[in-house]
Image (spheres, helix red, strand yellow):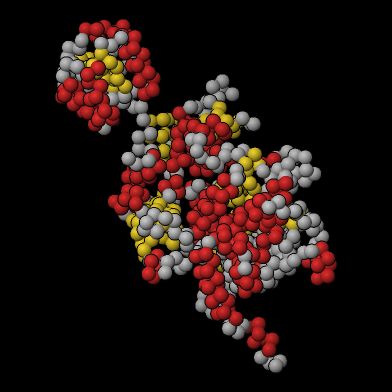
Amino acid sequence: MDLVAVFPEPPPPDLARTLDLAGYRWKAVGSADDAARNEPAAGWAGAVVACDSDPDAAWALCRALRKKDTPVSAILVLVSGSQLGDLDARHELFDDFCLTPFHPVEVEARLKHLFWRGGDAVRPDLVEYSGLVLNLETYQASIEGRPLDLTYMEYELLKFLAQNPGKVFTREMLLSRVWGYEYYGGARTVDVHIRRLRAKLGEEHANLIQTVRSVGYRFGQSRWGT
Amino acid sequence: MLDPQRDYVLRTVEERGVRLIRLWFTDVLGNLKSFAISPAELENALEDGMTFDGSSIDGFSRIQESDVLAIPDPRTFEVLPWGDPKATEARVFCDIHHLDGTPFQGDPRQVLRRQLDRAHAQGYTFFVAPDIEFFYFAPPRAGAGPEPLDEGGFFDLTTTDVAGSLRKQTIRTLETMSIPVEYSFHEDAPSQHEIDLRHTDALTMADSIMTFRLVVKEVAASNGVHATFMPKPLEGVQGSGMHVHMSLFAGDENAFYDADDPHNLSPVAKSFMAGLLRHAAEITAITNQTVNSYKRLVPGFEAPVHISWARNNRSGLIRVPIPKRGNANATRIEYRSPDPACNPYLAFAVMLAAGMRGVAEGYDLPAEADANLFELGDAELAALGIEQLPQSLSDSLRVMERSDLVRDALGEHIVEWFLRNKRSEWRAYKTHVSAFELDRYLRAL
């Protein structure tokens, strides 16, 4: 588990205990500058920021973590009831929040959810699968290092499939998850886009997207190795 | 706040180092028009559109209301696979609007979209797949006729190699531009080729055909060859058609399929076909819009002449291909008169309007005409109730002018302009004295 930044320095004792019990490796930081100085080589995996003692320094830290080239994408802030209004203008600065005084089980559950969502928290924006790379932040795709120029819907479909390798999706599932319900092209639209993607992937990679007879499509190998 | 599609376009331009974005749209006659903007202007263009002088475009505005707005459709954004890799270019199709934001009546793309929306309101999505024929010739020389590649020592390579590699290059380019190809082959006529596109919704397909025509011409030109979609470039051999396979889907069900019908055709399919047949003459000026188009629609060259349908008879206007057993989704009809020089947006719009009129009013499908109609005399055809398609541009304009269906589908603006433009084309043709006449009459009369 990578290192999590915790503010302030020292953190409230019950927060430190909660993180220890949940098994997180963490380091206390006293300011944005302090966080920059102490940042591990792989970057902060996330941050838990208690805002009640020094709200200005706390938000400055969140802002600094977000502004990095690879923004920290798992930031949990702890605020008191009277600070809830502060969240309004700052939604881009945190991923989740918890009211203080907090319940240890709640903080643990929220962190677990944040880190699950982020996957590999240091580089959450890359999806890689056998030569295919999708950069979710820049929307760029490449295959064997060659850029793959996709339309928006082709990109969204490939992203969804590549994020769920080995899993079989029906056309209806893909339609509702990728296009959303308002789209009226019907499931044939999915087939059309799959064909276009295969054509763009090129002959040697077209089989990354497999047709599962009378069910739908699967990206990559089946989970059962067939 | 940008929506994700616009964000995607802007990020791609930045990441791929796109230097120029070409805004594409189509005039009333189906010519591709384009102007280019820099990446710096793109965000503004996506948000508010780009103003340009519409009076410079055929069939767009009158002088007094000349400024219109091109609003890019971010779904159609693609990096262009040709050109200088260090100065990448991209294209995006546009919808044309008035400055107050209302759709511009002269924009073929929005005419088609309106028909598709109408069909959708009744629960249907319109899918099409065209088979597009074209010729490769040596670059045209002034005063000389078309010179087929197959005929002579224009190339160092054998002509089969040249045409084969042109076609391969073309297909590769099409596929990198989201246009999958179903089949491609050398046609019967010398230098003629056919590329069949995989079905998709009609708006995407009309966009694809615009791209297709450009790609075929570009790839040919870069190899010193001239590609043409002229409907009948050579006398005595078959011309170039664009047969259009069509089906209607209601959700995920093919509305043309009926397991209980002996031919697997549903009542919707039958009345759609009846609508196309009953209104075929009215829409012919749109599907076959040049003087030359009517030199293709003659007996003996696999082009339709009679307004009829059949399952396995290529002399009819509508053919119902027999799909592989049990493949309900492949049930479709093939409308065989259009040629590849048409405006695909307007052609799909009137074809859909004609079919949907048949569905709405429950037209009865006439009997199948499975005889070879070219062998029947006029009296026999009359007895079968089979009429002919209009024989000339002039004839088809006359029928179109009286058609409420076409006026309703295309709108007053386009119909008026189209009739004016095409009548003047016909007048110019009528005053031309042809080689045929000189050969036949100069000495004899």
Q: B139 left or right of B291?
A: left
Could you say where residue B401 lies in the image, as x and y percent from the top left? 60, 69
| Residue shown at 20% from the left, 10% from the top | A12
Query: Is residue A195 visible to the viewer in this orientation of the structure?
Result: no
Q: Residue B194: which quarter of the image?
A: bottom right
Q: A20 left or right of B403?
A: left
> Could you tell me which quadrant the C terminus of chain A lies in?
top right
> Could you tell me which quadrant the N terminus of chain A lies in?
top left
Q: A56 left or right of A125?
A: left
| Residue shown at 36% from the left, 27% from the top | A124
Could you say where residue B200 lies in the image, as x and y percent from the top left? 57, 47
| Residue shown at 83% from the left, 65% from the top | B383
**Front residue of B142 and B386:** B386
Could you say where residue B414 lies in the image, as x and y percent from the top left? 51, 65
Could you say where residue A87 lies in the image, as x and y percent from the top left? 26, 25
Q: B2 left or right of B147?
A: left
Q: Is residue B400 above or below residue B17?
A: below
| Residue shown at 34% from the left, 27% from the top | A123
Across the whole image, how many numbered discs are drawn on residues?
0
**Front residue of B412 and B219:** B412
Query: Is residue A90 visible to the viewer in this orientation of the structure?
Result: yes
**Front residue of B226 and A185:** A185
